[in-house]
Amino acid sequence: MARRTNLPRTTRRVVRILRPILMLVTRRDWQGAEKLPSGGYVLAPNHLSHVDPILLAHFMVDHDVTPRYLAKDTLFDVRLIGAIVRGAEQIPVHRSTAGAAESLRTAVEAVQAGQVVTIYPEGTITRDPDLWPMSSRTGAVRVALASGKPLVPVAQWGAQNMLWPYSKRLRLLPRTTVHVHVGDPIDLSDFAGRELTEDLLHQATDRLVDTLTTMLGEIQGELPSGPRFDVRSLERPRSSYTETPTDHPGESAPRTPETEEH
């Protein structure tokens, strides 16, 4: 178990409260931690439930990785929750055109500085009725390519048994087996050094989602039988982002990466 001395103070306090509870209410099928690179990288998990960031953070903390997510900006405005996410040094993602670019620049800088940043490729909890990964947004791939750092896929399963997607009814008993399987870093060498066009980013993102789907299929013992749900068909999320004087008022908004949320 990690010493946790490098965690932000707020994160250490949350860990002291939540980890004993999680040890009681979960069984843990954690595999592939040896595949986690050293230094900075992008961690790219599938998204099942509002509680899976906590369960994944449990895995990260116990493997000496500081949990740092791209978190939707509206969380930072919520009383108490906002103080926690700020104190835990999470990265706000502003889900607007100009704000998304700003958020991803911050993520790139963090990864280049040796930090691990977790970015949900889908940007939101899956809407697939069988909880398979949806076709995804390009933020995770964009940060990995822009930073030149590894992109590490993580398949997780079990969180939905504690809290079904978009449900408010938390179920802690009977104990849930939480599966967290780390895969080999995605090979993006054929995209390195090329212009980050939308077509290239979507090709690379499809490779990531194909990998996550295969990994999740190995956990479940089956693969999806239908087409992949298209995340781009979802309603555009809200954002608290407001332009600053440096956002070039009067000009049309530049084309920027698709936004992520968590």
Image (tube, helix red, strand yellow):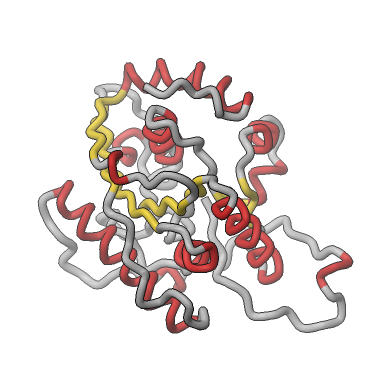
The location of residue 212, given as percent across then percent down, is 28, 58
Instruction: Describe residue 148's horizontal placement relative to residue 113 as left or right.
Output: left
Q: Residue 28 occupies which quadrant of the picture? A: top left
The location of residue 237, given as percent across then percent down, is 58, 62
Residue 157 in view here: no
Residue 182 in view here: yes
Give the answer, above or below, for where 172 lies relative to 92: above
The location of residue 155, given as percent across then percent down, is 29, 49
Q: Which residue is drawn at the image coordinates 38% and 73% (left, top)?
A: 204
Q: Which residue is drawn at the image coordinates 25% and 60% (left, top)?
A: 213
Of residues 245 and 236, the one drawn nearer to the viewer in this rendering: 245
Q: Which residue is drawn at the image coordinates 62% and 48% (left, top)?
A: 91
Instruction: Describe residue 86's horizontal placement relative to residue 118 as left or right.
Output: right
Give the answer, above or below, for where 88 lies relative to 226: above
Give the answer, above or below, for where 97 lies relative to 122: below
Give the answer, above or below, for where 237 lies relative to 74: below
Extreme residue toward the left, this view: 221
Of residues 200 and 100, the one drawn nearer to the viewer in this rendering: 200
The location of residue 132, given as percent across then percent down, is 28, 58
Instruction: Describe residue 97's horizontal placement relative to residue 165 as left or right.
Output: right
